[in-house]
């Protein structure tokens, strides 16, 4: 059954520059996950997403509770990405982040604060 994902983005600087947009995306299904990440993790925690075909991902959203770059994510052996805010990718842009999302590794390098990583994925049946 198709699901509609509504999204909005607003960013503004103190000088008045900014961007804003909103919309909706129809996906054939959704998947979500949330993982608690202890402070000062020595090794990344694997999140088994079982999504090896990124062509079937219409939307990928990663939202860390800490936005200081201490939460890192890594997909399919690529270099780890430090999250300093939410990461939202639509359609073909998912391939810029990962060629395979079978497993996503997450790590919290903050020495004293625990973190949460929330994941939302919009799926499409046809490539």
Image (tube, helix red, strand yellow):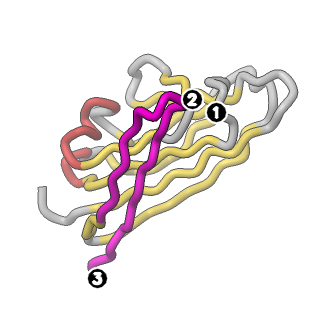
Question: In which image quadrant can residue 29 be found?
Answer: bottom left
Residue mark closest to the camera, 3 vs 1: 1
The residue depicted at 28 percent of the width and 40 percent of the height is: 94
Precedes in sequence: disc 3 or disc 1: 3
Residue under circle 1? 67
What residue occupies the far bottom of the structure in this picture?
1
Q: Are marks 1 and 2 in contact (CB under 8 Å)?
A: yes
Query: What x and y, as percent, mark residue 13?
Result: 50, 32
Q: Residues within 10 Å of mark 2 (few under 14, many from 20)?
A: some
> Is residue 117 or residue 41 the one in the foreground?
117
Residue under circle 2? 84
Query: What x and y, as percent, mark residue 45?
Result: 63, 35
The residue depicted at 27 percent of the width and 33 percent of the height is: 99
Q: Quadrant of the N terminus?
A: bottom left
Secondary structure beneath label 2? loop
Query: What x and y, as percent, mark residue 61?
Result: 44, 49
What residue occupies the far front of the structure in this picture?
15
The residue depicted at 22 percent of the width and 48 percent of the height is: 91
Q: Main secondary structure of the magenta part?
A: strand
- The residue segment tinted magenta is 2-23
In-image side of 72 versus 21 (left or right): right
Q: CA distance from mark 3 to mark 2?
A: 34 Å
Q: Is residue 42 above or below residue 1?
A: above
Q: How many numbered callouts?
A: 3
The residue depicted at 39 percent of the width and 44 percent of the height is: 88
> Is residue 9 or residue 88 the one in the foreground?
9
Residue mark closest to the camera, 3 vs 2: 2
Q: CA distance from mark 1 to mark 2?
A: 4 Å
Residue under circle 3? 1
Secondary structure beneath label 1? loop
Q: Residues within 10 Å of mark 1 (few under 14, many from 20)?
A: some
Q: Is residue 22 above or below residue 113?
A: below
């Amino acid at each position: 059954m198709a699901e509609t994902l509504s999204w909005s983005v607003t960013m503004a600087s103190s000088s008045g520059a900014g961007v804003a947009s909103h919309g909706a995306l129809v996906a054939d299904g959704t998947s979500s996950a949330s993982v608690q990440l202890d402070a000062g993790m020595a090794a990344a925690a694997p999140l088994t997403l079982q999504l090896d075909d990124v062509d079937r991902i219409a939307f990928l959203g990663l939202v860390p509770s800490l936005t200081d770059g201490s939460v890192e994510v890594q997909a399919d052996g690529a270099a780890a990405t430090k999250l300093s805010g939410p990461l939202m990718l639509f359609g073909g842009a998912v391939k810029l982040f990962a060629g395979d999302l079978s497993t996503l590794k997450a790590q919290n390098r903050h020495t004293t604060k625990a973190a949460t990583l929330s994941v939302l994925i919009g799926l499409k049946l046809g490539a």
